[in-house]
Image (cartoon, grey):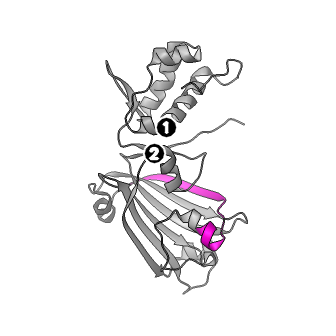
Amino acid sequence: MDAFIVDHKSPLPLHLQVETILRDLIQLPEYQNGKMLPNEVHIAKKLGISRNTVRQATNKLVYEQLLVRKKGVGTKVAKNTITTKLNKWTSFTHEMDEKGVVFKNYSVKVSSVIPDKEIQQLFNISDGVKVVKLERLRGLENGPIVYFISYFNPITGLTEKEDYSMPLYEKLEKEHHITVAVSREGISAILANKKLAEKLNISVGDPILFRKRVVCDPGDRPIEYNLGYYRADSFTYTIDIAKD
């Protein structure tokens, strides 16, 4: 908390500055692991602002289900909720490592498939050309919470026989000299079908956060087409948008 300050001369309202501070604070491993946040009076005194300003910022994160407030106890990060931000893109493994969250692979399946027309056009490949398809079911010790399906452009040189236990983008750079630079994403809410329900250990019809991602190299060539299915009770996406 000592490293966080507000700028009283900034045109950005104080409650928004505090909201940003809280979002950064709850990413720290100790708070992800259950430590109580400093109380509002302590934060207000530390930042030299009113308690109402801190309460306004805290209420926003409680509304987003990132924080849980219990009367007489305090405020803490929502249990089993992983937060990922769209203004900072990195590999999933590295992002979770930064948060101190230990993830495990429940299953990894690699195959060579003929992709559908959408992927053929995206990768600019001919009919009949196969691509590597990677399926990973990942989660915490108490069960899987995300199911990834990736298709890779043949120009990456990836094959079925490689070790996919290491972070993908690190592998691409170190072993295939492919650097990823841009991620274009689309996010929507869907309901779990039978297959997804079985994989994520939820009921058919439960909500799922669905993310479609196209990853490109510095030359804007599509390298990976990725589909991510997240348990809605375990993941929250946050987006920082600055006014022009």
Kindly identify which numbered label has been placed on residue 28: 1
Q: Mark 2 vs mark 1: which is more N-terminal?
A: 1
Residue at disc 2, secondary structure: loop
| For residue 139, above or below residue 158 | above
Q: Quadrant of residue 110?
A: bottom left
Q: Amino acid at mark 2?
A: Gly
Q: Quadrant of the C terminus?
A: top right
Q: Is residue 45 magenta?
A: no
Q: Position of residue 212 (x, y in %)?
A: 51, 59
| Location of mark 2 (residue) | 100
Task: Say whether residue 212 is visible.
Answer: yes
Residue 131 vs residue 80, the one in the foreground: 80
| For residue 26, above or below residue 109 | above
| For residue 96, above or below residue 54 | below
Q: Amino acid at mark 1?
A: Leu
- The residue lying at 56 percent from left, 85 percent from top is 129
Q: CA distance from mark 2 to mark 1?
A: 8 Å
Tell whether 111 sits left or right of 127: left
Residue at disc 1, secondary structure: loop
Q: Quadrant of residue 223?
A: bottom right
Q: Where does the magenta region start and end?
A: 172-190
Looking at the image, do the residues carrying marks 2 and 1 touch, with CB atoms under 8 Å apart? Answer: yes
In the rendered image, the residue lying farthest to the left is: 203
Q: Quadrant of the N terminus?
A: top right
Tell whether 232 sits left or right of 184: left
Q: Position of residue 172 (x, y in %)?
A: 60, 68
